[in-house]
Amino acid sequence: MTADPLSILNDVYGYDSFRGQQRDIIEHVIAGNHAFVLMPTGGGKSLCYQIPALARPGLGLVISPLIALMEDQVAALRQAGVAAAALNSKLWGAEKDQLWREIGQGDIDLLYMAPETLLRPETIERLKSTRLSLIAIDEAHCLSQWGHDFRPEYRALDCLVDHFPTVPRLALTATADEPTRAEIVEYLAI
């Protein structure tokens, strides 16, 4: 696949142009930089990590809080021809083993998982031997201890800074006041 963001936008998603700051964010991440993305729901946040994941070599890892959100994203991406998968509590035994084989062979472009799954020591160790194109933390406001959606597992995602220091990290949310934004940026070293 081409590394040109506009070509990916057109070929995979069927759009002719970016909205708002999407292109700037995407190019920033493709260049290997971290990003904090605050956009309203429906504003196109997903493209800000999906396109760089497709443009950069390796596996795009997406941390998402809900299995239903993961399943919707994976279904839409597969329909568009993207090799996407979700690793969550619904996947067991042979299916889980097969997914890890596909990841090891470089057959998956985007992998979605909940923070609880990611934080298992065996998951971190397996991912350390995988080339990651980026790590996207969706619904990043969940790490704010002052937020109504606080998830303790999100607070533990700061381990990504140490485990994957050279991998671009994106924190994405539609909901974050100024103190919450500062907390996210500092906590994830963005």
Image (cartoon, helix red, strand yellow):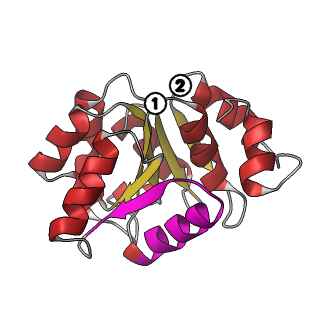
Quadrant position of residue 183: top left
In terms of depth relative to the viewer, which is nearer, 114 or 151? 114
CA separation in Å, label 2 and label 1: 5 Å
Q: Position of residue 27 (x, y in %)?
A: 68, 29
Residue pointed to by mark 1: 168
Q: Residues within 10 Å of mark 2 (few under 14, many from 20)?
A: some
Vertical comparison of 92 with 46: above or below = below
Mark 2–mark 1 CB contact (< 8 Å): yes
Residue type of the residue flagged with mark 1: Pro
| Residue located farthest toward the left when viewing the structure as drawn | 121
Q: Quadrant of residue 39?
A: bottom right
- Rendering coords of residue 154 (x, y %): 30, 56
Sooner in the amino-acid sequence: mark 2 or mark 1? 2
Question: Magenta segment: does it hold 10?
Answer: no
Front residue of 180/89: it is 89
Element on which disc 1 rests: loop
Range drawn in magenta: 68-88
Please give the label number shown on residue 33: 2
The image shows residue 41 at horizontal and vertical percentages of 66, 66
